[in-house]
């Protein structure tokens, strides 16, 4: 069952972004800070991996380091590196201070395939804690490495790994705007839409097959839905006035959007095929930035009905009055539920700065997570552990990420242009925490 | 029955307009009376007259308001002049008076629109952070354009709302829409037909100033009045 699921994942990874243009530059990720107690792990070079452009052990190490939760140990002085169970000298690795040791090899197989085998050992108990073999196309070594990172992360932290996910974002280069999709580590950036008018608010469908976004290419805000498999796109909402702030329902069947067709910006529900627009909020004020709760029953949204923009929560069925959620400060916008539905992130005006904050829904407790001058558009990793957001450094738009406890920070920069409007894609195939084998 | 209404309307019009301008209208109306035999023609004539009455009444109301405002504007400009230390005499054109009651549109409206020093040459309304109410100082600009639209009924405008780039892009998009709507609302209150004013928001996506300071931000928090089909 597990292998079948993995096969489907690979197929999806290959099909994704067919026909899109390769982007000009990779993204660079710098990690700042780290978790309170980092898990020690030693990832040795896999046997034979040097023959391939994508070095699996390096990709896995980078993934784990980037999470801020791991401390990568030195690879020792013994050569050759062990690649088989029998080669592992536990006494030596204990003396090196290793606690979790990862080994493996890459073996060419007929038909352009490659078999990637990896094992993780608990050095203390001298036992294998994880072991998998992958038979993949040689072009899938990077994706395989991310899959290995996910398995290690899950084994050692107990949480779902999000290394095999995608992110989307907008790059502004001069007067040109590009909607790009990349791996969560910033590699393989692909331009999926390019235009000389602004693009904002990309949002992934829950199944990761489509991205809804807002384009000004018709000199006004119109919502489009792009199929990331075949690059086709269609208009979701082009009513009179502005059409913006798309937010997918958890089942992917409909979206909450902001329309001004009846005057001021109000929230509507619309089917994913663009039919059946139905008004949801009735205020004389701005209501925008809807975001579904993971159970699909509630919306968080921004409204200035009390005189300044604040975050409110309402039932999707429209019953009852919206409840105000934020009370600190005069500017709280862009709410996004955490994947477990227990908290939400938002942008809080913090004196002269605009920062990412997180609020517990039950207790109302608020924590400010970032300190940039102008932080925008927070988006949770699908495992809820990191929050990606737009920030600014030396006058340029960059992406940054912060762990949901505020301890780990990353900075993601493109080599050229302003990068903004991030959206973290879902776990593919609705992959949840998998039971150990 | 129709005749009673028309007669009443004509009387109302005469009272309402009291003075210049209605003479031509009256002659036209009499012509229509003589010519119109059928019921359909009567109805059409009546509809036309009703519309004209409304127009003329609005014109009159506006004229009164305009006079008041012009006085205020003149006072203001005088004050501004004094502060600036003696600039050129301000060019104040009583646009609504000039065209009132006759066929003034022989003048090229586009020329008037671009005449330097005229409030019509000003096309931008500026706002405070997170606000969309129109500040006192921009009321004359809106009035000038409203009057201009009333005297040039073939023209249409687009109002484009913009914001500085702080805060949320989506909230700014909504705020820009409100800014544009606030201009539209002010103009419709002055009598411009709603369907001649289109509103659009670019949110924070089309800044004209790129600095990260109040000087740039204040430039970007604005509504622009754009004449559609301007050559």
Image (cartoon, coloured by chain):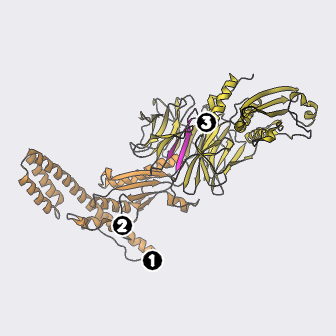
Which chain is painted in orange? B
Q: Are marks 3 and 1 in contact (CB under 8 Å)?
A: no
Among the 4 quarters of the image, the one containing residue A437: top right
Residue A399: % across, % down: 64, 48
> What residue is pinned by disc 2?
B73
- Rendering coords of residue B219 (x, y %): 50, 61
Q: Quadrant of residue A335?
A: top right
Distance Cα–Cα, label 3 vs label 1: 71 Å
Residue tagged by mark 1? B85
Is B200 on the left or on the right of A413, as rendered?
left
Quarter holding the C terminus of chain B is: bottom left
Share a chain, discs 3 and 1? Answer: no
Sequence-wise first label, 1 or 2: 2
Q: Which residue is mark 3?
A: A15
Q: Residue at x 55, y 31 (%)?
A: A250
| Residue at x-position 65% and y-position 37% | A165
Q: Which chain is yellow?
A: A
Crowd rating for badge 2 (residues with CA inside 10 Å; few <14, some 14–19, many 20+): some
Which mark's residue is nearer the viewer, 3 or 2?
3
The residue range painted magenta reads: A196-216
Query: Does the stretch in magenta take in A160?
Result: no
Where A354 sits versus A324, above or below?
Answer: below
In the rendered image, the quadrant that contains the N terminus of chain B is top left
Number of the front mark, 3 or 1: 3
In the image, residue B168 above or below residue A166:
below
Chain under numbered label 1:
B
């Amino acid at each position: 069952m597990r292998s079948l699921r993995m096969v489907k994942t690979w197929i999806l990874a290959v099909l994704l972004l067919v026909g899109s243009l390769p982007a000009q530059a990779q993204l660079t990720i710098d990690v700042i800070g780290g978790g309170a107690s980092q898990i020690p792990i030693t990832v040795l070079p896999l046997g034979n991996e040097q023959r391939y452009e994508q070095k699996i052990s390096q990709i896995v190490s980078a993934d784990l380091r980037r999470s801020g939760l791991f401390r990568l140990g030195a690879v020792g002085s013994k050569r050759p590196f062990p690649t088989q169970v029998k080669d592992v000298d536990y006494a030596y690795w204990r003396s090196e201070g290793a606690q979790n040791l990862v080994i493996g090899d890459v073996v060419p197989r007929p038909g352009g395939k490659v078999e990637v085998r990896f094992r993780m050992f608990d050095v203390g108990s001298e036992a294998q804690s994880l072991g998998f073999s992958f038979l993949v196309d040689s072009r899938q070594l990077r994706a395989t490495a991310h899959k290995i990172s996910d398995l290690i992360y899950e084994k050692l932290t107990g949480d779902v790994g999000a290394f095999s996910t995608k992110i989307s974002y907008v790059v502004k280069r001069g007067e040109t705007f590009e909607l790009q999709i990349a791996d969560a580590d910033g590699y393989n950036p692909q331009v999926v839409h390019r235009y000389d008018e602004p693009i904002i608010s990309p949002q992934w469908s829950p199944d990761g097959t489509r991205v809804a976004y807002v384009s000004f290419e018709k000199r006004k805000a119109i919502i489009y839905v792009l199929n990331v498999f075949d690059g086709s796109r269609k208009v979701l909402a082009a009513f009179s006035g502005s059409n913006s702030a798309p937010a997918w329902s958890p089942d992917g069947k409909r979206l909450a959007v902001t329309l001004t067709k009846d005057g001021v910006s109000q929230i509507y529900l619309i089917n994913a095929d663009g039919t059946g627009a139905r008004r949801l909020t009735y205020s004389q004020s701005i209501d925008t930035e809807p975001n579904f709760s993971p159970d699909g029953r509630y919306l968080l949204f921004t409204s200035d009905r009390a005189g300044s923009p604040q975050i409110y929560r309402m039932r999707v069925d429209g019953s009852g009055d919206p409840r105000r959620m934020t009370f600190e400060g005069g500017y709280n916008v862009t709410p996004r539920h955490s994947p477990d539905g227990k908290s939400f992130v938002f942008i809080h005006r913090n004196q002269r700065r605009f920062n990412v904050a997180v609020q517990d829904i039950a207790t109302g407790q608020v924590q400010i997570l970032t300190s940039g001058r102008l932080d925008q558009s927070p988006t949770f990793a699908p495992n809820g552990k990191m929050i990606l957001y737009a920030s600014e450094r030396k006058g340029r738009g960059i992406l940054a990420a912060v762990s949901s406890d505020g301890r780990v920070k990353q900075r993601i920069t493109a080599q050229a242009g302003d990068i903004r409007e991030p959206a973290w894609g879902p776990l593919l195939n609705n992959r949840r925490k998998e039971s150990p084998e | 029955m129709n005749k009673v209404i028309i007669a009443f309307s004509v009387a109302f019009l005469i009272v309402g307009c009291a003075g210049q301008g209605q003479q031509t209208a009256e002659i036209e109306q009499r012509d229509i009376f003589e010519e119109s035999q059928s019921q359909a023609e009567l109805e059409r004539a009546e509809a036309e007259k009703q519309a004209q009455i409304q127009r003329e009444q609005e014109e009159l109301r506006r004229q009164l308001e305009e006079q008041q405002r012009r006085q205020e504007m003149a006072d203001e400009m005088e004050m501004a002049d004094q502060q600036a230390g003696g600039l050129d005499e301000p060019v104040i054109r009583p646009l609504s008076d000039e065209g009132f009651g006759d066929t003034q549109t022989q003048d090229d409206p586009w020329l008037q629109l671009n005449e330097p020093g005229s409030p019509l040459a000003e096309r931008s309304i500026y706002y405070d952070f997170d606000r969309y109410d129109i500040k006192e100082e921009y009321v004359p600009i809106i009035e000038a354009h409203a009057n201009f639209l009333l005297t040039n009924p073939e023209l249409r405008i687009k109002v484009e709302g913009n914001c500085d780039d702080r805060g949320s892009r989506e909230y700014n998009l909504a705020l820009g829409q409100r800014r544009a709507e606030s201009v539209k609302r002010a103009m419709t209150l002055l009598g411009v037909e709603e369907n001649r004013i289109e509103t659009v928001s670019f949110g924070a996506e089309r800044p004209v100033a790129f600095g990260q300071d109040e000087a740039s931000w204040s430039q970007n928090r604005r509504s622009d009045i754009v004449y559609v089909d301007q050559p």
